[in-house]
Image (spheres, rainbow, N blue to C red):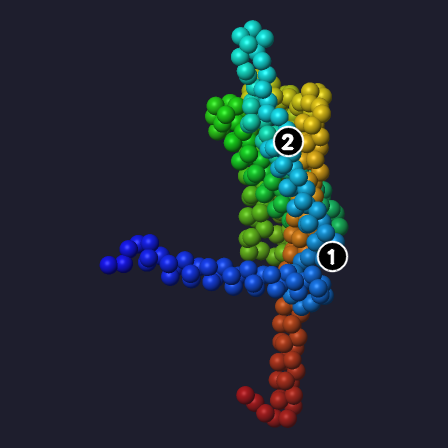
């Protein structure tokens, strides 16, 4: 009788073989790109973007070390009871959540600015830029909602509060840009699709000031505190790590935006190439028919 452990060995060897093949194939691909950047391997990278990607990766590692190892947890002593109070280790999410929220503002503002540029100029460059910024911004906004819920569980004792104005305005902003991206997937004339998406982006961006100022305008209807950075309540290594977080996530945004823009531009160029090839093919067929008709040949 073959036991379960022995029966798993062939499966394990099969998976190990697949992983070795996968790693070998990708190592050869990366080596080819590094040694011959102008090779025929399909990529949206360039020497500059690869340097940015490497710097971003190193920055992320440094940020995680600062945030989760070197900085101190938030522990204070209650003046009356003498008990330890504060957010403890949960405060470390500050270095991820707040920079990602700010980058979300930057991404959606850029999407709205580029959308306005498209409505004025009507050129593909503005449309591709708006689409790339909106897509990357939606990824950041999703991460903001997720990290905020994880942070809120130990601090507020709840994953989500439907009555919190900042949470709800952020959720509305996220859903509006999800709708923007869904609109980009509909079957329509590209120019009509771009014009409709630009209008949606400009409508959605109106929610951004509400998100940012909600803690001041609806102070009694939010669990969020006012900006500790604006009131200069943090300093030393905490302030330094937060600044590193802003820089690193700005680099992440720039890297993602660059590659998403290139993908969008290549997709646009491929579509135009297909249209041009189809027109050329139809013209060739028409010319062939005219020649056949002139010499008296009919199909």
Q: In terms of secondary structure, where does tag 1 sit?
A: helix
x, y percent for residue 177? 59, 42
Label 1: how many Cα within 10 Å (few below 14, some 14–19, many 20+): few
Q: Is residue 98 above or below residue 107?
A: above
Residue 232 pos. (x, y %): 72, 21
Q: Provide the residue designation for mark 2.
A: 70
Which element carries disc 2, helix, strand or loop?
Answer: helix
Dot 2 crowding, Cα within 10 Å, few <14, some 14–19, many 20+: few
Residue 214 is left or right of residue 247, and the answer is: left
Residue 256 shows in the view: yes
Q: Please name the residue shown 69% across and 57% down the image.
A: 45
What percent of the width, then of the height, locates residue 163?
A: 51, 24
Please tell me in which quadrant of the rendered image residue 173 appears.
top right
- Identify the residue at horizontal 67%, vertical 35% (top origin): 245
The vertical placement of 5 against 225, above or below, is: below
Residue 102, relative to residue 295: is it above or below? above
Identity of the residue drawn at 61% across and 52% down? 193
Q: Residue furthest top?
A: 80
Q: How far across and down, in percent of the image, does residue 132 sit?
A: 65, 49
| Residue 80 tag number | none
Q: How many marks?
A: 2
Comparing 221 with 278, the one in front is 221
Q: CA distance from mark 2 to mark 1?
A: 33 Å
| Quadrant showing the N terminus | bottom left
Q: Nearer the viewer, residue 171 or 59?
A: 59
Can residue 270 be seen at all in this image of the molecule?
A: no
Q: Which residue is mark 1?
A: 47
For marks 2 and 1, the one nearer the N-term is 1
Q: Residue at x 67, y 58 (%)?
A: 44
Image-quadrant location for residue 268: bottom right
């Amino acid at each position: 009788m073959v036991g379960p452990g022995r029966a798993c060995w062939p499966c394990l060897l099969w998976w190990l073989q697949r992983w070795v093949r996968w790693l070998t194939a990708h190592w050869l691909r990366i080596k080819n790109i590094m040694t011959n950047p102008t090779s025929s391997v399909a990529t949206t990278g360039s020497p500059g973007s690869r340097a940015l990607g490497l710097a971003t990766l190193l920055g992320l590692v440094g940020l995680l070390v600062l945030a989760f190892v070197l900085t101190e947890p938030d522990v204070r002593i209650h003046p009356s009871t003498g008990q330890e109070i504060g957010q403890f280790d949960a405060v470390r999410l500050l270095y991820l959540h707040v920079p990602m929220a700010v980058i979300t503002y930057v991404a959606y503002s850029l999407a709205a600015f580029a959308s306005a540029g498209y409505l004025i100029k009507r050129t593909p460059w503005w449309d591709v830029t708006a689409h790339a910024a909106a897509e990357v911004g939606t990824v950041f906004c999703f991460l903001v909602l997720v990290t905020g819920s994880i942070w809120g569980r130990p601090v507020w004792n709840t994953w989500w509060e439907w009555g919190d104005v900042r949470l709800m305005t952020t959720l509305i902003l996220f859903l509006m840009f999800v709708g923007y991206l869904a609109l980009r997937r509909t079957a329509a004339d590209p120019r009509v699709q771009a014009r409709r998406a630009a209008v949606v982006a400009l409508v959605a961006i109106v929610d951004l000031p509400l998100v940012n100022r909600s803690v001041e305008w609806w102070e009694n209807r939010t669990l969020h505190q006012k900006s500790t950075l604006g009131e200069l309540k943090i300093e030393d290594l905490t302030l330094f790590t937060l600044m590193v977080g802003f820089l690193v996530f700005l680099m992440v945004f720039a890297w993602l935006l660059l590659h998403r823009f290139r993908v969008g531009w290549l997709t646009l160029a491929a579509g135009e190439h297909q249209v041009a090839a189809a027109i050329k093919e139809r013209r060739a067929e028409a010319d062939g028919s005219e020649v056949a008709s002139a010499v008296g040949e009919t199909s």
